Amino acid sequence: MATRVNTTRHDASSGAVATTVTPASPESRIRIWEAIAPVAVTVVLALLPTPPGLPHFAWLYFSIFAGVIVGLILEPLPGAAIAIIGITLVGVLAPVVLFSPRQLSEAGFQRAEGCHRLGTVRIQQLNGLAYLRRLHARAWL
C-alpha cells in the first residue's frame, strides 16, 4: 500500500484551509524485488550442483556469501543489517556450511573449542603486535 503525504495550508486572509494529498514516490519505499533478490540468489546457488573439486559445505557457504553481496549492492536494508543477517545465517547453519561431514564425525571434534583456539591465537597475535609497538615507541624516546 502506498504511503500518502498530507500537506495542509491555511490562508490567513480568507480563513480557508486546503489539504493536498499526494501519493508517495516509489523510491521512498522498499521495492519487493530488492528484498527478494538476495534470498533468491542464495537459494538458487545452494540448489545448483556443487562444482567438481569443491566440497559441498564450501558451496553452501559461497551461496550465502553471494546473497550477502547482492544484498549489499541492492540495499533493501542498511548495509549493517544485511551483514548481521548473513553472519547470523552462517552462525545458525555452522554445522552445515563451515565444517565437512568428516570433521563433524571425528570423535574429539568440538566446534566451540576450535573457535576458542582460533580466537585465542588472534588475541595473542594482537597482544604481540601491541608489545612490538611499545618497544618501537620506546626506541624513539
Image (cartoon, rainbow, N blue to C red):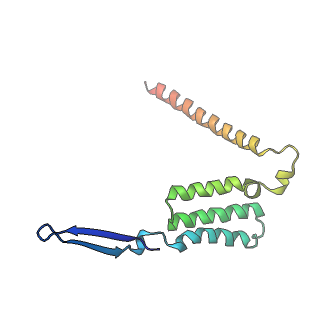
**Would residue 102 be found to the left or right of residue 78 on screen?**
right
The residue closer to the viewer here, 9 or 73, is 9
- Farthest residue toward the left? 13
Residue 24 on image: x %, y %:
38, 73
Image quadrant for the C terminus? Answer: top left
Image location (x, y in percent) of residue 138 = 48, 25
Quick check: 61 left or right of 103? left
Between 118 and 89, the one nearer to me in the picture = 89
In the image, residue 123 lies at what x, y percent? 62, 36
Left or right of 123: which side holds 15?
left
Q: In the rendered view, would you say 38 is above or below 90?
A: below
In the rendered structure, the answer to whether residue 36 lies left or right of residue 24 reads right
Residue 68 appears in which quarter of the rendering?
bottom right
Q: Quadrant of residue 38?
A: bottom right
Number of marks: 0
Which residue of the protein is positioned furthest toward the front in this rendering?
A: 15
Could you say where residue 35 lies in the image, as x and y percent from the top left?
A: 55, 69
Q: Which residue is found at the position 67% from the left and 56% from the top?
A: 90
Query: Residue at the location (11% across, 69% down)?
Result: 13
What residue is at 64 percent from the left and 54 percent from the top?
88
Which residue is the extreme one toward the right? 107
Please say if 95 is above or below 117. below
Q: 100 or 136, which lies in front?
A: 100
